[in-house]
């Protein structure tokens, strides 16, 4: 069971419907590029839309969002947080678990996500080093790390 972030998270157009349904089933408050009718907008506009509503943005487009985060920092533009996850659709539930885990990690580690970049790579490193994430079994962590349970 997740700790369920207390605020809405915006899923950009790179996040699959499978992830969206998985997060909703776990009680995560979300909205999406599709629901907000910005699905065909470029990443810059999706980030701007999320920021205008105070929603952190979850994406599987790590490179583009990393560049956008840096551009926002250099320009002094605010955003409500960017959370990137390495998608692994070839493994059943891997991407879904990664998204749930990183949202729980962000909620626990940094309730104020404004102008921050949270990367799956950072959480991955902590999990590989033996840290645990409350609410997740060893099997779920193994799946999220890219292995089989």
Image (cartoon, rainbow, N blue to C red):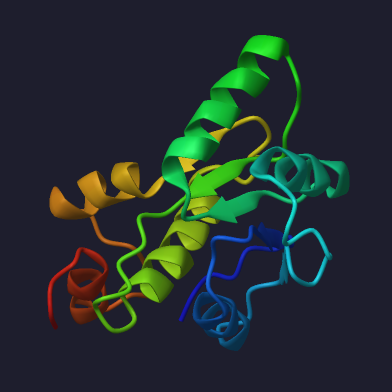
Q: Is residue 33 above or below residue 35?
A: above
Point out the residue furthest to the bottom here: 25
Q: Is residue 14 above or below residue 83?
A: below
Q: Position of residue 84 (x, y in %)?
A: 47, 48
Q: Residue at x 73, y 48 (%)?
A: 46
Residues 54 and 112: in front is 54
Left or right: 31 in relation to 59: right
Q: Residue at x 58, y 42 (%)?
A: 82
What is the total number of numbered labels drawn onto the structure image? 0
Left or right: 98 in relation to 45: left
Residue 130 makes an appearance in the image: no
Residues 129 and 32: in front is 32
Left or right: 101 in relation to 41: left
Q: Position of residue 48 (x, y in %)?
A: 79, 39
Residues 88 and 122: in front is 88
Q: Position of residue 29 (x, y in %)?
A: 71, 72
Q: Residue at x 62, y 46 (%)?
A: 111
Q: Position of residue 89 (x, y in %)?
A: 33, 73
Residue 64 makes an appearance in the image: yes
Point out the residue furthest to the front here: 40
Q: Residue at x 14, y 83 (%)?
A: 149
Which of the 4 image quadrants contains residue 147? bottom left
């Amino acid at each position: 069971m997740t700790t369920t972030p207390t605020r809405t998270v915006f899923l950009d157009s790179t996040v699959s419907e499978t992830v969206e349904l998985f997060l909703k089933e776990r009680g995560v408050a979300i909205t999406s590029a599709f629901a907000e009718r910005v699905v065909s907008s470029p990443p810059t506009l999706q980030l701007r839309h999320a920021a205008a509503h105070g929603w952190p943005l979850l994406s599987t487009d790590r490179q583009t969002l990393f560049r956008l985060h840096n551009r926002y920092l250099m320009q002094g533009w605010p955003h409500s947080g960017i959370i990137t996850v390495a998608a692994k659709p070839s493994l059943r539930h891997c991407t879904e678990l990664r998204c749930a885990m990183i949202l729980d990690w962000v909620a626990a580690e940094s309730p104020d996500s404004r102008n921050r970049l949270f990367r799956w790579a950072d959480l991955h490193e902590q999990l590989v080093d033996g840290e645990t994430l409350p609410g997740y079994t060893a099997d779920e962590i193994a799946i999220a790390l890219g292995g089989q349970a």
